[in-house]
Structures are given as C-alpha cells and as structure tokens.
Amino acid sequence: MNKKVELLAPAGGYETMVAAFNAGADAVYLGGSKFGARAYADNFDTEQVLDAIRYAHLHDKRIYMTVNTLVKEREFSQVYDFMVPFAQERLDGVIVQDLGVMRLIRDEFPDIELHASTQQTVTGVYGARLLKDLGCCRVVPARELSLMEMKAIREKADVEVEAFIHGAMCYCYSGACLFSSMVGTRSGNRGRCAQPCRLPYQLKGTSAGGETYPLSLKDMCTIGIIPELIEAGIDSFKIEGRMKKPEYAAGVTALYRKYIDRYYADRKSDMTVSREDMDILKGLYLRTGISEGYYHQHNGRDMVTITSPAYNGTSDKVLNMVKEKYLTGEKKIDCRLDAYLTLGEPMVLTMAVKKNGEEIYETVTGSEVQAASKRPMDEASIRKQLEKLGNTPFVAKDINISIEDLGQGCGIFVAVSELNELRRALAEQMLDKLTDKGQKESFQHKESYNDRADAQKGEEISTDCIDKTGLFHVLVNTSEQLEAVIETIKDYTEKIRVYVDSDLFFKLSDWAASEIKAFKEEEKAEFIVALPFMTRQEKHDGTRDIEQIARAMQDGLFSGVLVRNLEQIGFLRDISFDGKVILDYGVYMWNGQAANMAMEFGKEDFKIRELSIPLEVTFHEAKEIADSIIEKTGAIVSYNVYGAAPMMISAGCVKKTLDKCSGRLNEFNREKMTLVDRMGNNLPVTTNCRNCYNVIWNAHPTSLHKKLESIRNSGKFDHLRIDLTTENKKESIEILSAFLYGDQDELRNLDDKGYTTGHFKREVE
C-alpha cells in the first residue's frame, strides 16, 4: 500500500477551491460554465478554470472537471470547443456520464484522465471492467455499494475507485432518477434536480401522524471508518457538496485530512474521532442525523431522516474558526533569491524553489553593473526591490545579496527599473517551469467535431440483423399482464415482440410457457427477457440469474434480453452472450455519439443491435437522436408510447421504512404500495425482493395515443413500445386494444383515466 488515498474536495467557486487546498485536499472537482451536474452551483467560467488548473499544478494538486450531464444531439458540437482550452492547460481529469462525451474526450484529448461519474450507476465488477476497456482509468461507483463490493471492483476490475465519504445522499441510484424531470422540467441528469426526495409523503392506508419524509436520506459521515475504507483499496475519498459554502468544503476537508494523516503516521493508533471534531462536522451543514451510508448495510429505517430533511443550524463559531484558518487566500510558494552584483559584470538574479524534495533553479542576467557616480546602491535598497513579489505566486523567505566593487571604493549602481524587470522575468520563468507551460498541446480544430465523420463513424449493423417484428412491442411485469397480452394478440396480424420481466420469466406458468411456444412456432411473436433495473453482487449475486437466463435461451422460447445497466452489458459481454441484446431507455442515448460508443460494447459474437430513446427528450429531440443513431450506426431504434415512468430506482425500501420488511429477501417476490404526495397524487411503489430494490412509478402513465399518427408518419422509429407496469389484467387489455387495434372506446377510456404526455413537448432544462 505505497500509494496514499487521495482526498478529493468539492469546489463550487474559486474561493472554495483555494480554501479546500489550504485545508489539505489533494484534488478538487469543479464544474465549468456548461455540461456540469450542479447547474445551480456558482461554477467557474473558462478563465477561472484555467486559473484553477494553474494554481493547483503550482502546488502539486489536481483538478477534475465535471462534464457529467447528458448532452443533447444539438448541443454535442459544442463539447469539443468547450474542452480545448482545458486540455491545453493540462486538465488532470474529467468526470463523465454521457457515453458520447466519454468517447469524444477519449479520442480527442487522450492526455486527460477519464473518470466514470456516479451518474453512470456502476454497481459491480463487470460494469467497471467494461468502462475501463472503453478508456476510463477511474470509476465512481453507485453510492449504494457495500465496502465489499467496492473492494471487489478495485481488485477484480483493476480500475481506480473514487468513493463518496461525506455529504448529502440521493435516495435514488444516481443517474436512474427521473422524478424531478417528470413532475417538472428540472432533470437530475442535466444538473437541475429539484429534490422531490426532500418533500413529505404518506403511505396510503396509514394514518397521517404528521409529515413523514421516507425518501430523504440522512447525510453520510464516514470519518469513523477511515481505516476500513483505506484498507478496502479505495483510491480517492470524495466529499460531496459543490453547492455548499467554502467553509463547508474547508472544514470537512481539514478534519478528514487530520484522521487520514493520523492513520498513515501510525496504523495502530487510536482512530476514535473526538467529540469536539464531531461537533465541528455537525456544525457544517449536516442534516438532522447522520449515517455511514451503505458501506455496512443495504438499507434501513435508520438511514432515513423520516421527520425532517432540514439541515441542523450551522455553528457561527465553527464557521468563523474555519474562515480564519483556511479562507486566507491563495497560498504562496516559498523561494530563495540570490543577487550577484559585481562591478563590470552582468548582474545575475537566481530563484530557488523546492519541489518534491529537490531544489529547482531559474536564472536571469541583466546589463553590466556600473560604478556609482553619486550615492552607491546598498543591500537594503536592493532587498526592498527584490521583495516585491506580491502579484506573483512566490514569497521570498530568504534573500542573499552579493555586492562587489572590486576594491574600487566607489560602490555600484544598477537601475531600479531594470532590477524590477529582472525580478518579474525571473518569477515568470520559474512559474512557467513549475507549470510545464512550454509542454502544452496544440489542438487544430478548424472544423467542428461532428463534421469529422470518418473519425467518428461507428460499426454499422449489417442488414441481415434487421429486426423482423412489427411496429409494436409490449413489456409485461406480471402474470396478469402476460395473460392479457397473450389473449389480445391472438388475432393481431403483425408479428409482435413481448418483453417478459425476469422475475416473471423464472415463475412462468405451464400455460404461459405453452402459449409462448405456440406463438414462436407460428412466428407470430418474439419473446425477450427484460432484466432487472439493478444487478449487484452482494449477498445475492444477480449475475447468476442472468447466467441462467442466458442458458435458457437455448430452448428457443426466448431470443434475447433487454438490458437496463452497464453491469448487465459487461457481464453478458464477458460470457459472450450470443442472443439479441437490446439497450433499454436507462442506458442513455441522448446523442448519436453515445450510440457509437454503445457499438464498442460488443466483442466477438456479442453485439449491441437495438437502442431505445430516453424518456426525458421531446419528440423533436427524439427524431434528431434517431436520425443520428441511424446515420452513425444503422442500429434499430425503439420509442416508448405508453407506460408509467420509473421515477426512482432505490436500494432504500419504502415498505421497510414505513411498515416492515416482507421477510422474503432475495426471493422472487413483489409487493405494491402507494405513496401520497403533498398534492394528493398516488405514486405506486413496487418492491423487487429478489434484487432488493424499489421502483417508484409516476402517478399517471405517459400515453401518446393522441400522438400516434404523427409518430408513425415521422418514419423515424423502427418500433413503438408499450410498457405495462402496475396495471391489472383488465386495464392491460384495454390499453393493448387501444394501441394495437385503435379501439375508439378504449382510446376514450385512456382520456378519462388520466395520463401525461411526459416530455413529448415539454423540454427538460
């Protein structure tokens, strides 16, 4: 364990960055003016980012930039030009969510480290290994992972792990939350989350008993388990909080720095956190109650605030203490100046700076030293000029001046203006040397990134892989819904595809299996297994279920899988799965370059052939994405026209928090509850006990039945998908009759029951 863990602090502004470094941070992460997942932080303009990089490198620190939002097709051409100045200034790393942005940075700026954002929802070894193969040197796994899972990623995927150690916690798996955008226009995937998880909700059927906050997690504080985290092999400790004040970043950083250094100084020392230090942390914008996060538990009522999501009152005493100690402005670099002034010889100034235990020297030479005609220059007057380093990063801790008139007795003279100029030139030379200014790369970008088609074109899909199913595809989650589909499509003239949820696949009745077989033999339908929203290798290893599903493909009833996350893609790739692989809308394709990257997921016989349009884009944006995907890859594109949006996928369990656990952990068990929001809307919640997660569904399904004609006429989408989520059998038959057969009575029923058109026309910010 030679390499020490990195302490990574947040910086919403330049002052915060400086304060975090003063407090002991090894690196900071910050957002620029675009493409960052904290749109409401102060953030940095371009010049401030460049100044930050220069300052950090001068002090042997690192800067990581968050380019971690999903990027729309029409915005994508801006990313390259946005990144150029930072690459030229030798930015250390970029934290990325969008697969297209990842590909661009990897290909165009290879000297910048690629870090996979927690927004990519990395939940295990296979997803991490996939991202490493695509060019990432570091992953920020989902905050929900246990210490055991983090350790496995570090060891088995052989990729750096950056893990959150302190700060606010999202209830939903990061990157999988659509709640904010579905109830408004502020998308968490675009850095504008409105934090609906911090609002009150009641479990339907229970007495009110005051407001409850079942989706509001306590803040994380892991200062008490630092040795465990280090020994698990975590490479970087990440403090959350780019929207918080400088005092927060500096104060929290200083305390973690203290205990990290104590551990490395003596690993057997007492690491008990003092009451005084805990009081300081609690006085720095922590919510009511704290927890150690998910490192030692999958979920639990004790992780949730329940009664109040508000912050504790901050301590003015703590804030003032932090301010006085760390908010002291930029740190200067100690240097030594030597001046050699010998009559008749050029004057020489030398600066010495210590870096990594060695002294670095720079020298400048001026004009010839003259004999004084009147008052000779003395050491004090020369020292006064040399000390004037105020506008530079340096401070002279030692100045040595050698004056020699060779025994003439007249003394020497040099022009003060020249002495000042030499001092400025010397400081600039040393600054250039310390920041490697002469080694910056030059980027030729006369044409925009998107115009360079040859360099960016992905692997096209051959025509023999084109899907032969009809326009509509249907996804089912329950046996009732599957029965409704089987009964409804018997007289349907087009071949149809049915996605069967994996839990349902394992519990398939004999009747359903025989019906599926009959449809397959008559070539009237194709059946695909829809994998879980989350796959983990915890106490229950979810990849074993996927392995069983892959083996079951051999009997011919099912021909492929709908994948929901990178972990599943990585696992299927590693076992060389040869069935159809369809990426669901949660594997985000917001631009054509993301589709290009998706084509790189494949190897040998494992290929990605079909993609889905995300739920957060407008119809106009969806058409732009489809055009770009088809142009760049030729992939098959699916578009959702019906279904309740899964607004949150959470490791937290609403039932366990507000009622009690079902007691059927890791069994094929699902239960349904309903949360009621402040406006009286009923939000269905379903448990997936097999993989231990909850899905919170939108109160109303997204239904584009009134838009079908324009969607079909656009000719942009190969398939239109109907997702049955919480509907019963009768409701499912009505929905299918409306969409598949255009039944006018059922179409009117859809109007009467209430629905939303989602983001069809409503653009997210």
Image (spheres, grey):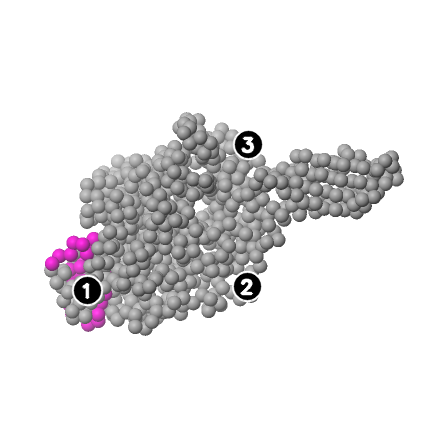
| Picture coordinates of residue 575, whole percent (x, y) | 29, 57
Image point (23%, 64%), residue name: 559
The answer to whether marks 2 and 3 mark residues whose Cβ atoms lie closer than 8 Å is no
Q: Which residue extends farthest left?
A: 511
The answer to whether 100 is drawn above or below residue 40 in the figure is below
Q: Please report whichever mark, 2 or 1, sits nearer to the chain's N-terminal start.
A: 2
- Residue 303 visible in the current orientation: yes
Say which of 263 and 285 sits in front.
263
Q: Nearer the viewer, mark 2 or mark 3?
A: 2
The answer to whether marks 1 and 3 mark residues whose Cβ atoms lie closer than 8 Å is no
- Identify the magenta region: 481-510
**Residue to which mark 3 is pinned:** 324
| Picture coordinates of residue 752, whole percent (x, y) | 24, 59
Q: Is residue 593 left or right of residue 438?
A: left
The kind of residue tagged 3 is Glu
For the N terminus, which image quadrant? top left
- Residue 171 visible in the current orientation: no
The answer to whether 291 is drawn above or below residue 145 in the figure is above
